[in-house]
Image: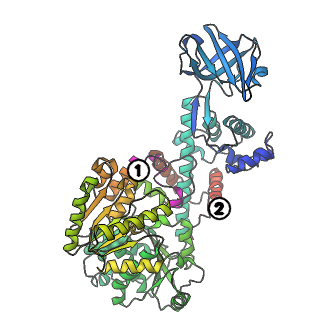
Amino acid sequence: MTGLDTDIRNIKGIGDTRARLLKKLGIVTLRDLVSYFPRAYEDRSSFRPIDTLRPDDVACVRALVVSTPRLSHIRKGLDLVKLRISDDSGSLDVTFFNQAYVKDSLKYGSSYVFYGKIGGTLNRPEMTNPVFEPEGKSEITGRIMPVYRLTANIGQNLFARTVRSGLDELRGIIPDVLPAPVREKHSLAHADFAYHNIHFPADMDSLMLARRRLIFEELFVLACSLRLLKGRRTEKNGTVPKDADIGEFYSSLSFSPTGAQRRVVEQIIADMLSGKPMSRLIQGDVGSGKTLCAAAAAWYVYRSGYQTAFMAPTEILAQQHFETLTKMLSPLGITVGLLTGSMSAKQKREIKNSLVSGDVDVLVGTHALLTSGVEFKHLALVIVDEQHRFGVNQRSLLTGKGENPHVLVMSATPIPRTLALIIYGELDISIIDEMPPGRQSVDTFGVDEKMRARIIKFTRKLISEGRQAYYVCPMVEENEALDLKAAEQYYLHLKNDVFPDLRVALLHGKMKNAEKEAVMKAFAAGETDILVATTVIEVGVDVPNASLMVIENAERFGLSQLHQLRGRVGRGEHKSYCILFCENGSENPRISIMCKTNDGFKISEEDLRLRGPGDFFGSRQHGLPEMKIADLSADMNLLTEAQDAAFELLGHDPGLSKPENELLRQRIDELFELNAFTFN
Ligand code: ADP
Ligand code: MG
């Protein structure tokens, strides 16, 4: 029986050759074929009388062939077919280049519809290489045509025809994953209508209806999936630590936690005491003090004799977290360990042993934590920093090392709340919306080359006062080799020509880990004045004495990236500055936003607005399945609507076990399977 899962080779007219071409586009089944949505449309629906046509008009003409098509062979590689067509209002010359077959497909005395662009002159308009078909056929003229994203080996017409035969096979049997009440409540078209009209819309209104329905469907299925994921997780039992007085932990600190930090820690503790595994995201701008919340959670489970795993995206960050946590936790009797890929086999073995025996209470590390030899005695809490760099799958590898451990994800990428709700749909969200006291905003300036001498002088002044500075290298392009070369030259220039009397060091992503670590250590210890760096310092690095951030070619960095970089300064008691070198100084819209605000949420909203749809989140970054038609950042209203609908439906039928929701459940199961999209 034919259905969405039918292999396209079973469709009439699709042979092995075409199947191979389609496979290159990722199309194997009928579902793949009809879900290969057009990237644009060409409106061929306007018909015009010949005497109204002017050069450059694009239109359909319904006309009679009034001269026998003539083929002339001009020279090798150039054949022309010429004919004249005519309607009630006038006549028009038509020329085809190198399409000799046209001579026999257009018959003298028959009516066709021609679609194309008008050339020639006002007095003597003509049409060149139009598409055409017999009047009344309306397959490629007189309608809105899809335009697909294709590779060189397959043309638009052939592809459109293939989709059409796929749709014909499926006519009336495309199952609708949206339950009827959802469709009705949200005024959504049927699946059958939507799939036909997204490819071959009857008119613009139908196209809009089809689009709306398909975007809604995609977001709705995603929202349901994430919600179910959360549900599956909360069906399980979480480890319940002994109740403890968090004030004990707070009083060991050299500062007092902010109200926001206390609130988040309360939420974490409530989660862990609930009997269900926690899955919570802490969102807080750079410098808001997420680490403290993580440490509080680790302390809490330690009080019951349980272990914590803390995963960071880079070695530098793992190293820093290790140091911070050791400082905070070891006075309280907690043993913190470090495991990274660059450690020696012996070191790794030792740390693994003390992990199994329970001698290490908190293990900080990179992806190395995910490897199979890493076993805990009793892992109760998993903390993941900067989660957008890890996929959902990686998180599940880590949680697999305990029995439904509590999961705490920390993200410094502020994103608009609506978006966070879906991207982190399977997590509860805590927001740290308050900075530690005394935190000053970083004064930010967009400058051009004319200011260079003054900036150099300013750098010297700050350093003479005992501060340190970051200089972020110019970016050449997204080309590692070239960027590395530029970084090295830039470093040598600063070290030898500009600041020969100061201590200048270089940090870049291609350095060996031990080297990176040594450079960072020296900078943190104040043994270096200027750290020249590529964007490896973007995430998390914490040196409170650094008070100047200079970024070259700032116009080449994304807004969020600039914000992250700027977050490296203003972390201590010293007034801090961020200098953005760029061609037009502060006239560049992104640079001017940076100068106006330090608020990460505002910046992310502007980023979204400036970058436009599609670019904000690659699906790789957030670990969600790839969207075929919806745009998580552009279709915000539908997203909220789809999410509300999902919650409502799951409220009535939490396991999607009612017969009317059967198709939806199947679709979600497939999605889970396809993406190995499991949490635990
Ligand atoms: P992030 O949220 O970017 O991870 P961190 O946890 O690294 O922020 O904290 C940034 C800096 O602020 C650290 O140096 C930390 O010691 C300090 N800090 C955190 N909370 C407080 C607080 N309540 N009062 C004062 N300083 C704090
Ligand atoms: Mg941090």
Identity of the residue furthest to the front in this view: 497
- Residue 158 in view, yes or no: yes
Name the quadrant containing residue 204: top right
Q: Secondary structure of the magenta portion, mostly?
A: loop
Circle 2 residues within 10 Å: few <14, some 14–19, many ≥20: few
Q: Quadrant of ligand 1?
A: bottom left
Figure quadrant of the C terminus: bottom right
Is residue 623 covered in magenta? yes
Q: Which residues are magenta?
A: 610-636
Vertical placement of residue 381 versus 391, above or below: below
Q: Would you name the residue on which mark 2 appears? A: 673
Q: Position of residue 129 (x, y in %)?
A: 66, 24
Q: Would you name the residue on which mark 1 appears? A: 608
Q: Nearer the viewer, residue 173 or 115?
A: 115
Q: Which residue is located at x 29 percent, y 47 percent?
A: 587
Dot 2 amino acid type: Glu
Is residue 627 covered in magenta? yes
Q: Is residue 448 left or right of residue 388?
A: left
Q: Position of residue 143 (x, y in %)?
A: 62, 26
Which numbered disc, 2 or 1, marks the residue that appears first in the sequence? 1
Q: Is residue 563 left or right of residue 277?
A: left
Q: Position of residue 47 (x, y in %)?
A: 59, 18
Between marks 2 and 1, how big is the CA–CA gap?
31 Å
Q: Which residue is located at x 76 percent, y 19 percent?
A: 71
Q: Position of residue 41 (x, y in %)?
A: 57, 34
- Label 2 CB sits under 8 Å from any ligand 2 atom: no
Total residue callouts: 2
- Residue 287 in view, yes or no: no
